Amino acid sequence: PRFDLYSIYVAEGDRLCAIMTSTAFDAYLVLLSPSGRTWEDDDSGGGRSAMLEVQADTTGVCILAACSYGQGLGPYQLRITCPSGTHWEGTAVPLPRHVPSAVEAQPVQLGRLDETDARLRDNTCYDCYVFNAAAGDRITVSMTSATLDAFLAVRSPSGAIESDDDSGVGTNAFILIPAADATGQWCVFANSIGPVRTGDYELRVSVQPTEVSPPRPAPSPPVPNRLQAGGAGTTP
């Protein structure tokens, strides 16, 4: 079956509720936790609506797949709530239909934005990549293209987002994060700005672990200058 993917930031212990309704097909939901645990539902929302109510087992980005039970196609409504209060509104982001590309083994990615890619609300195409980093790591991400005005967004497991248009040379994008604010899976969104919305690009991701300096020995206490000590005496 066809499906749409969404990413949702949650904190451990959050109560997450997702409801999918449609008059065109039998709705079906699948939720994947950062820990690898999976929840699925078909008709718990009543009728042919799907509903998932789960407690997040870890902090990070969950992936929610909205699909149909069978081969149904058509419009649907998806509602996501997190009553615990730690969920930030607006962190449900549409992702590409394919699994995001991991970049650990290949720090240089040759990609292409085209009309088959997922789209943001401004109707521009984007590709999504994921990588792992630990809190305190130094992260650099760059996107270069000879045809596109590159635009980058990097999202932390905490939900914080850094974006850039032209900090690289010319119309290239560059993001430097001196110290990662969270450990886990980070997402990179490769996008474009301007009239040209499709074309080839090169994406580079670098993660440099934090270097912990060994503790320095404490300085020795000053040695008293016995020659300057007052008083008189004899040595045995």
Image: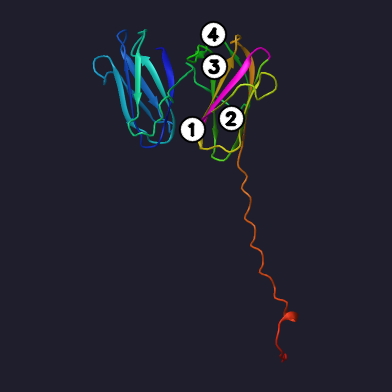
The residue shown at (60%, 14%) is: 112
**Mark 4 lies on residue:** 115
Q: Is residue 223 above or below residue 137?
A: below
**Mark 2 lies on residue:** 104
Q: Is residue 43 above or below residue 234?
A: above
> In the rendering, at what x and y percent does residue 147 appear?
66, 12
Amino acid type, callout 3:
Tyr
Range of magenta residues: 146-161
Left or right of 16: which side holds 179?
right
> In the rendering, at what x and y percent does residue 149 appear?
63, 15
**Mark 1 lies on residue:** 157
**Mark 3 lies on residue:** 126
The residue shown at (27%, 14%) is: 48
Mark 3 and mark 2: span between their CA atoms? 20 Å
Q: How is the image coloured?
A: rainbow
Q: Earlier in the sequence, mark 3 or mark 1?
A: 3
Q: Earlier in the sequence, mark 1 or mark 2?
A: 2
